[in-house]
Image (cartoon, rainbow, N blue to C red):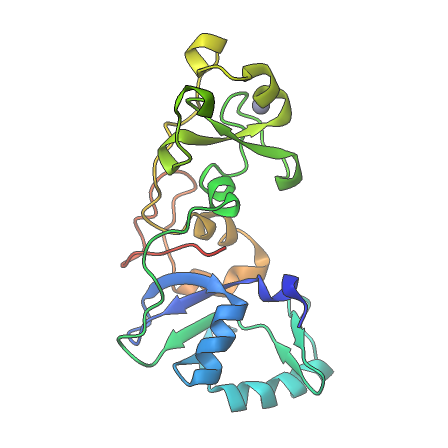
């Protein structure tokens, strides 16, 4: 299967339909094929659940009547529609609980905004800045990295922000919940998540979520 499609985000619900995690489609398929989860399809304000066998059957039907936001994983013999939401049916098989420290989650935490000039950029034009430079003992941690555009990162060089006359838009912190949620929930592609993840403010904490949420690579 092509890697990119399998990097799509999938919302994970627990048995009580509470959003608890965001994982990759690759990880979701592993849980589905193990029988540890089912697909929740939410359309026209109605939810339906499918085990993997039923989901594959439905996928064949969907290939004839595709939705514009559908995406597909291709195996030699099958096309399987990428699920957007899954529900765990085994209580103690929650995926890991802390937000993964990686580029994607750092850029999502900072909402694609350069923390120095405050402008938003596409991911390809963003870099990761060590607030306290590594040459001065700065660590690669949530609290010491910030999203920066190439220009600001170059301008700052190997200096602390105060020594470069630059100011951070936000103090970098470790997110408690998946920063991807904030970003994804706004897009049409992930509109089915909105029923399960409500009241997400456009900035700040994601108070509407009842449990902790994690990122994935
Ligand atoms: Zn900048």
Pick whichever, 43 or 129, lies toward us. Answer: 129
Say if 203 sits above or below 15 in the image. above
The answer to whether 103 appears left or right of 38 in the picture is right
Can you see residue 209? yes
Task: Examine the rendered structure and indicate whether residue 61 appears above or below residue 188.
Answer: below
Residue 165 appears in view: no
Residue 119 versus residue 160: which sits nearer the camera?
160
Q: Position of residue 172 (x, y in %)?
A: 38, 31
| Rendered position, 149 above or below 48 | above
Residue 40, image x, y percentages: 46, 77
Residue located at (31% from left, 53% from top): 208
Q: Which corner quadrant of the image does residue 58 belong to?
A: bottom right
Q: Locate the N terminus by quadrant.
A: bottom right
In the image, residue 79 sits, relative to residue 194, either above or below, namely below
Instruction: Give ligand 1's quarter of the image.
Output: top right
Residue 108 located left or right of residue 5: left
- Horizontal and vertical percent for residue 162? 42, 11
């Amino acid at each position: 299967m092509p890697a990119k499609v399998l990097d799509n985000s999938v919302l994970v619900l627990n048995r009580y339909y509470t959003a608890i995690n965001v994982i990759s489609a690759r990880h979701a398929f592993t849980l589905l094929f193990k029988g540890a989860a089912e697909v929740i399809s939410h359309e026209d304000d109605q939810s339906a659940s499918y085990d993997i066998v039923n989901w594959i059957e439905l996928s064949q039907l969907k290939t004839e009547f595709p939705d514009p936001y559908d995406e597909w994983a291709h195996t030699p013999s099958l096309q399987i529609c990428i699920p957007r939401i899954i529900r765990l049916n085994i209580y103690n098989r929650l995926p890991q609980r802390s937000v993964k420290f990686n580029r994607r989650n750092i850029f999502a935490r900072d909402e694609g905004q350069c923390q120095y000039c405050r402008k938003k950029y596409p991911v390809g034009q963003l870099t990761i800045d060590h607030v306290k430079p590594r040459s001065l003992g700065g660590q690669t941690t949530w609290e010491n990295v910030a999203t920066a555009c190439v220009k600001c990162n170059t301008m700052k060089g190997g200096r602390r922000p105060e020594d470069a006359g630059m100011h951070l838009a936000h103090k970098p912190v470790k997110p408690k919940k998946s920063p991807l949620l904030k970003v994804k929930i706004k897009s049409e592609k992930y509109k089915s998540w909105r029923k399960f993840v409500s009241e997400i403010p456009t900035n700040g904490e994601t108070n509407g979520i009842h449990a902790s949420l994690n990122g994935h690579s």
